[in-house]
Image: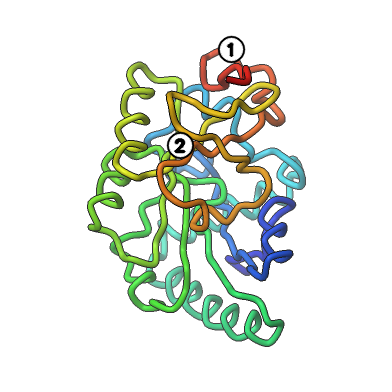
Amino acid sequence: MKLLNKGNAKTIKGEKVGFRTYGIHLSPFNKSGFSVCKWASKGCASACLDTAGRGVMSNVQRARITKTQFLFQDREGFLSQLRKEIRSALVSSERKGLVPCFRLNLTSDFEWEGTGIFEEFPEAQFYDYTKGKRRMMSYLTGNLPPNYHLTYSRSEKKRDDVHSQSFLASGGNVAVVFRGELPKTWQGFEVIDGDESDLRFLDGKSKVIGLVEKGRAKKDESGFVVEGKPS
């Protein structure tokens, strides 16, 4: 069972500009019996992309559950295999003239810091989204490895807009899901189209990463999806 894939319909867009994203689809929340999304809000859970595209297939769901159980039941075995696959990805990408990057949380928010993976591959770019405020603060204060980029993911939780503004003011980026047309600004900060590619580490600083509602998010009424009125 391979852990890394060569991206999905969104991440593969990066190949047009010379990057190849390798990622891991874990089973979100506690569907596997183990929690990998401990900061998830109700809105996030209901709009999760876990069942988007091929994710709707039962065999894909089983594979994600199996990977997640592997991580928690045999952590060293999982990390050993992940290291081998990263080494292989580095070689394969170089042969194709592509720059490899890695998003280990395609459908999860697991804390990979502390596993040693980032430090072992300093030449590789890693990136993720997170709803963990503490994780985001660690990133902004330089307490995470320099080759790991984090984008904060806004939720509908009370006061989360205040936290998002604080992260933006500190140079961090915040992903916001919008309904309809993306606005030019949100909370006074520039909105860029996050659906053009998944290469978040190229976005610059203090950017709102605008994502258009997809799948189950189209029915969201929790406040997770923001009305996209041009400003």
Q: What element carries label 1?
A: loop
Question: Where does label 1 land, which residue?
Answer: 221
Q: Which residue is drawn at 39% across and 67% down?
A: 147
Please tell me how crowded label 1 is: few (under 14), some (14-19), or many (20+) other residues with Cα within 10 Å.
Answer: few
Q: Residue at x 43, y 42 (%)?
A: 173
- Nearest the viewer among 123 and 62 is 123
Q: Where does residue 69 sit, x and y in percent of width and height?
A: 49, 54
Q: Work out whether residue 66 can be spotted.
A: yes
Q: In this view, does 116 lie above or below 24?
A: below
- Nearest the viewer among 185 and 89 is 185
- Sequence-wise, the earlier of marks 2 and 1 is 2
Can you name the residue that lies furthest to the top here?
221
Amino acid at pointer 1: Glu
How far apart marks 2 and 1 lie (CA) works out to 17 Å
Amino acid at pointer 2: Ser
Q: Where does residue 132 sit, x and y in percent of width and height?
A: 34, 39
Q: Quarter holding the N terminus?
A: bottom right
Q: Residue at x 60, y 25 (%)?
A: 183
Q: Work out whether residue 35 can be spotted.
A: no
Identify the mark at residue 71; answer none if there is no mark: none
Q: What element carries label 2?
A: strand
Q: Quarter holding the C terminus?
A: top right
Q: Foreground mark, 2 or 1?
A: 2
- Nearest the viewer among 126 and 105 is 126
Please tell me how crowded label 2 is: few (under 14), some (14-19), or many (20+) other residues with Cα within 10 Å.
Answer: many
Q: Is residue 20 above or below residue 89?
A: above
Question: Where does label 2 land, which residue?
Answer: 153
Specify whether 159 is left or right of 74: left
Q: Which residue is drawn at 66% across and 56% down?
A: 11
* Residue 92 quadrant: bottom right
Q: Where does residue 186 sit, x and y in percent of width and height?
A: 49, 26
Q: Where does residue 40 sit, x and y in percent of width and height?
A: 43, 32
